[in-house]
Image: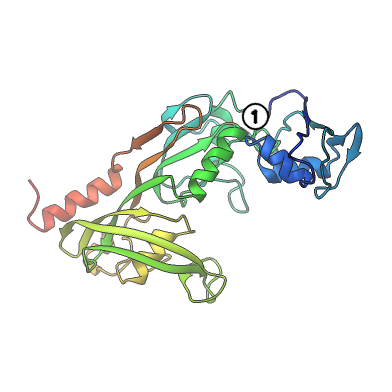
């Protein structure tokens, strides 16, 4: 059951083989379209009754034939304003919106970016948001860095959010990227598997680490074209760590061109055309659609700034038409 605009009450009777289960776990099994954290928050807020008596204990045990009622309050508005910011919509329905994010667009409002973000744009564009986590907001399931362009999927209701989140966690979402990197990675087809964590020298950066706090990150790459001092590389990631591709490519000595944070400035003769952002684009995205339960796949062409630099490199290396 998805969160809806008006208050609703869900009533369920505990079955004969279900006695003794924790209340939050039992409700999660009965309401797969609602996240467990959301259910726990509702229990804490006193929105659950057991045989008519209010319960605020998540670890309460359900009993045979117990009547459990969950009151889902109306979706609360968020303190983020809707803004008429153009977005490139690839596909949209009542469950999801797939978009081709332009470089320079921040995902969430935060310190330094209180407005002008993708969330502001989606609040304006999507007239049928059903809410996520009890708030009338889009469900950001995954992120692209501010200066990375390309495909993203956003959930429009809690059910879609939970289904997509499970797919990302279980590796069922397929993500392909195109990057322009310095040099030629060897081998030209490879798999990078490391731990990535917060850099001890700069907390704004991530790094390959052996620290226990690091998380496994897996990136597969293939060199598609060699253009002088650069290569066009296709990448797919099996995990979704912060800055993963940028960190991995810098780690093997082939940073993404234009990436000022991870060392993407090495070729002096191209200093005058150093791009305003890293040359990294999310080109393909595939997932199981939460409404149809069928796999869907989307593609987004390489944006103009990357296309123009590739054309320049081909010309400089004698490969232009």
Badge 1: residue crowd in 10 Å (few <14, some 14–19, many ≥20): some
Mark 1, secondary structure of its residue: loop
- Point out residue 201 in the picture as x, y percentages from the top left corner: 53, 76
Whether residue 90 can be seen here: yes
Relative to residue 56, is residue 31 drawn left or right? left
Which one is nearer the viewer's eye here, 204 or 244? Answer: 244
- Point out residue 273 in the picture as x, y percentages from the top left corner: 27, 57
Q: Residue at x 77, y 47 (%)?
A: 22
Q: Residue at x 54, y 66 (%)?
A: 204
Q: How many marks?
A: 1
* Rendered position, 211 above or below 60: below
- Point out residue 217 in the picture as x, y percentages from the top left corner: 44, 62
Residue at numbered disc 1: 2
Residue sitting farthest toward the front? 16
Which one is nearer the viewer's eye here, 73 or 54? Answer: 54
Which one is nearer the viewer's eye here, 141 or 35? Answer: 35
Whether residue 40 can be seen here: no
Relative to residue 269, is residue 142 drawn left or right? right
* Rendered position, 256 above or below 80: below
Q: Which of the 4 quarters of the picture holds residue 208?
A: bottom left
Q: Residue at x 67, y 39 (%)?
A: 29
Quadrant holding the C terminus:
top left
- Point out residue 136 in the picture as x, y percentages from the top left corner: 66, 32
Quadrant holding the N terminus:
top right
Relative to residue 214, is residue 257 drawn left or right? left
Please say which color scheme the image uses: rainbow
Q: Residue at x 50, y 27 (%)?
A: 291
């Amino acid at each position: 059951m998805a969160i809806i605009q008006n208050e609703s009450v869900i009533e369920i009777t505990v079955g004969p083989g279900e006695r003794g289960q924790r209340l939050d776990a039992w409700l999660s099994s009965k309401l797969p379209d609602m996240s467990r954290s959301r259910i726990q928050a509702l229990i804490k807020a006193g929105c659950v009754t057991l045989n008519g008596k209010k319960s605020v204990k998540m670890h309460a045990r359900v009993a045979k034939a117990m009547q459990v009622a969950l009151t889902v309050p109306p979706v609360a508005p968020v303190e983020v304003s809707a803004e008429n910011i153009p977005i490139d919509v690839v596909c949209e329905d009542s469950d999801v919106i797939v978009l081709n994010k332009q470089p320079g667009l921040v995902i969430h409002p935060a310190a330094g970016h209180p407005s002008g973000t993708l969330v502001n744009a989606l609040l304006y564009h999507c007239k049928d948001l059903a809410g996520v986590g009890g708030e009338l907001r889009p469900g950001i399931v995954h992120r692209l860095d501010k200066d990375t362009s390309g495909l993203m999927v956003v959930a429009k209701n809690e059910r879609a959010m939970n289904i997509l989140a499970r797919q990302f966690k279980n590796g069922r979402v397929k993500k392909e990227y195109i990057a322009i990197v310095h040099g030629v990675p060897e081998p030209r087809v490879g798999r990078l598997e490391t731990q990535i964590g917060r850099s001890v020298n700069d907390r704004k950066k991530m790094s390959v680490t052996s620290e226990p706090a690091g998380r496994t990150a897996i990136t597969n790459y293939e060199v598609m074209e060699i253009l002088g001092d650069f290569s066009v590389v296709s990448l797919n990631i099996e995990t979704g760590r912060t800055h993963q591709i940028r960190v991995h490519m810098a780690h093997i000595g082939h940073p993404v061109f234009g990436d000022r944070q991870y060392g993407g400035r090495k070729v002096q003769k191209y200093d005058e055309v150093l791009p305003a952002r890293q040359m990294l684009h999310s080109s393909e995205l595939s997932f199981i659609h939460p409404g149809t339960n069928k796999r869907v796949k989307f593609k987004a062409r390489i944006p103009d700034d990357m296309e123009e630099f590739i054309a320049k490199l081909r010309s400089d290396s004698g490969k232009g038409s």
